């Protein structure tokens, strides 16, 4: 997905504590006295992309004098696709206070902790709230589409793979870059603890995103690179 939203979240079984990453964060606070902003998840299968129902990630950015506000809500709803019970995630974006796009994403976390992307239903609106399109919508097994892996449970630097595949509709790719990235966003400061990825699609040559994920929390920063000024989409609240 182009915006987090896919959100809008390292290693799946390195030790027993990684199944409960909020314990590590709590230990860090007690040991250092530092204030770390986080919301303790209650269910997770992937440290970088936890799908905890009831959680809302809020992101904001400024782009070409426009103010972007993005909310990614992990719903309690599910959708059965190819025999897999997918979690439904509602992703909405406002431009200067006006709802411009609403997307329902369908994710499935397998027993190993890999998060699969089974499609999305996306709707775009004009300034008056009228539906103007459904660009980017697709579902696995329909019209030659296939599920991709949004986030591996145990990614390695240099590894690349498809996140989604719907011919001429959705063909996002990802490459894992490093595990020592840093991010400073309104929600918190994360020093050399993050996974950074590069995402691109052959459908939009030159459009590149670098995404930064804090383990146990999820996506905290998106850097949108397109040849012009870099746009920073930052996590501001959970």
Image (cartoon, rainbow, N blue to C red):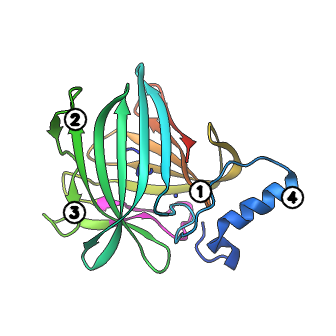
Q: Which residue is mark 4?
A: 31
**Which residues lie in the magenta part?**
148-164
Q: Earlier in the sequence, mark 2 or mark 3?
A: 2
Q: Which residue is mark 1?
A: 217
Residue closest to the far left = 143
Q: Quadrant of residue 132?
A: top left
Q: Which residue is mark 2?
A: 125
Where is residue 105 drawn, in percent x and y?
32, 57
Q: CA distance from mark 3 to mark 4?
A: 46 Å
Q: Residues within 10 Å of mark 3 (few under 14, many from 20)?
A: many
Q: Is residue 6 magenta?
A: no
- Is residue 15 at all visible to an observer of this figure? no
Q: Is residue 154 magenta?
A: yes
Are discs 2 and 1 less than 8 Å apart at CB? Answer: no
Which type of secondary structure does the marked residue at label 4 adopt?
A: helix
Which type of secondary structure does the marked residue at label 3 adopt?
A: strand
Q: Which residue is mark 3?
A: 139
């Amino acid at each position: 997905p182009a915006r987090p939203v896919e959100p809008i979240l390292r290693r799946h079984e390195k030790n027993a504590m990684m199944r409960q990453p909020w314990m590590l964060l709590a230990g860090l606070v007690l040991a250092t006295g530092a204030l770390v902003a986080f919301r303790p998840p209650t269910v997770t299968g992937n440290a970088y992309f936890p799908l905890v129902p009831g959680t809302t990630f809020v992101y904001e950015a400024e782009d070409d004098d426009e103010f972007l506000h993005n909310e990614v809500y992990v719903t309690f709803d599910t959708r059965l696709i190819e025999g897999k019970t997918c979690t439904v995630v509602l992703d909405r974006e406002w431009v200067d206070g006006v709802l411009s796009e609403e997307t329902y994403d369908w994710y499935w976390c397998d027993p190993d902790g890999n998060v699969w992307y089974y499609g999305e239903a996306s709707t775009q609106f004009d300034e008056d709230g009228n539906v103007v399109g459904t660009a980017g919508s697709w579902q696995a097994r329909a019209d030659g589409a296939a599920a991709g892996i949004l986030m591996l449970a145990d990614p390695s630097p240099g590894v690349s793979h498809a996140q989604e595949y719907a011919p001429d509709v959705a063909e996002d790719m990802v490459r894992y870059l490093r595990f020592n990235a840093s991010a400073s966003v309104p929600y918190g400061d994360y020093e050399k603890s993050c996974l950074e990825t590069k995402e691109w699609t052959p459908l939009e040559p030159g459009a590149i995103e670098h995404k930064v994920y804090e383990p146990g929390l999820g996506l905290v920063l998106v850097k949108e690179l397109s040849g012009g000024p870099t746009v920073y989409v930052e996590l501001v609240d959970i």
